[in-house]
Image: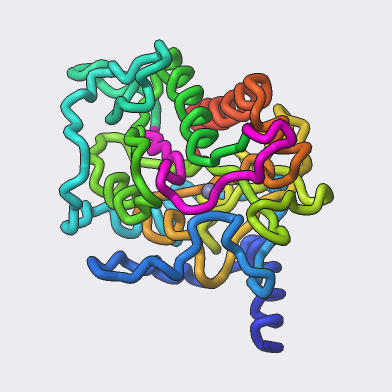
Amino acid sequence: MFKKFLDAIGNLFKSLFGGGTDPQPKPKPKPNDPITDIPQDGSEITPDTIIIVADETENVIIKPDEKDIEFDDDLGVDENIPSTIPDDNNSSGDSGTDGSDNEEEGGSGGPVEGEVPQGRFLWCLDNGHGQFTKGKRSPVFDDGVTQFLEYEFNRDIVRRIMAQLDEHGISYYNVVPEVEVDDFLRERVDRANAKKSELPKLFISVHSNAASARSSKHWASASISGIETWYFHNSKKGRKVASIFQKHLVDQTGLKNRHLKSRPESQFYVLRKTKMTAVLTENGFYNNEVEAAKLMTDEMRQKIADAHVVAILEIEKNGI
Ligand SMILES: [Zn+2]
């Protein structure tokens, strides 16, 4: 335990000051790797977990040819491609901005087929959970009916992001357009890894958070609130991307700043298994009654989506 504590302190310093140690290779996915014990998001973190908190305002300097812990390591396509990957022949920029049927549409958006792709990256947008994911919903509000459903929120934010990226001509890939799915964790990652792209890929997983509460029917403490962004531990590129998202999310929403987070052990599945720089945004706490009410509003959802888009535009402009 004491060694863990020392390691955590050491990692904290490395995390804060850049650390000079060689990056550890990212574990490669195995076809039958059990995923049940790998957390999906911030709400699944147990209190005894070591979490490294980093300051998003600190500059992360990456030299032009610097090799990161991930991203450059293994861009090969996973041979274990699942059969559920949707037909991606609709990569003609028709992912649509006109609303209602967006959730059923998949594939890529942005530049029209045949044109040279614009921008620097293909943004793999991940909506985190499906309709059949267990839990991931708030207690029922006082009206006896209203409930925050995380899969719906995540999809709404991603839909709003895609609509704006269409306008900017920025390439994206809606990783899981289907609604009626479970966690779908492995497929999310395999699809993003298998997605063919002339542009380097970045993976953004959009979530909302939950604090521990007496039960899923009880609201958590009102003192726990705000936004945090997670990155793959020791990934400088991940931390840099996360810092840009966190900065804009806090600026646009005015919600509490919970900074950047990473875990030396048992990292989130989508951060650990993706073969590209990946971050996970936790946009407010849906089991904080006051914050959940804000997250239900069109205004707050648009602010959250806008912040993601501003972050994407900044990274498109400056690179990482
Ligand atoms: Zn989640």
Image vertical order of residue 118 relative to residue 77, above or below: above
Would you place residue 11 above or below residue 261 in this image?
A: below
Furthest residue toward right: 223
Q: Is residue 251 left or right of residue 60?
A: right
Q: How is the image coloured?
A: rainbow
Residue 35, quarter of the rendered image: bottom left
Screen quadrant of the N terminus: bottom right
125 vs 270: above or below: above
Q: Please give the name of the residue rendered at 34% of the width and 48% of the height, measured from the top-left corner.
A: 188
Residue 255 shows in this picture:
yes
User: Toward the viewer: 182 or 21?
Assistant: 182
Residue 318 seen in this snapshot: no
- Residue displayed at 70% across by 68% down: 13
Q: How many marks?
A: 0
- Residue 214 position within the rendered picture, expressed as x and y whole percent measured from the top left: 72, 61
**Which region is colored magenta?**
121-145
Q: Nearer the viewer, residue 175 or 231?
A: 175
Residue 36 drawn at (x, y percent): 41, 67
Q: Give the residue displayed 53% in from the left and 52% down from the top.
A: 135
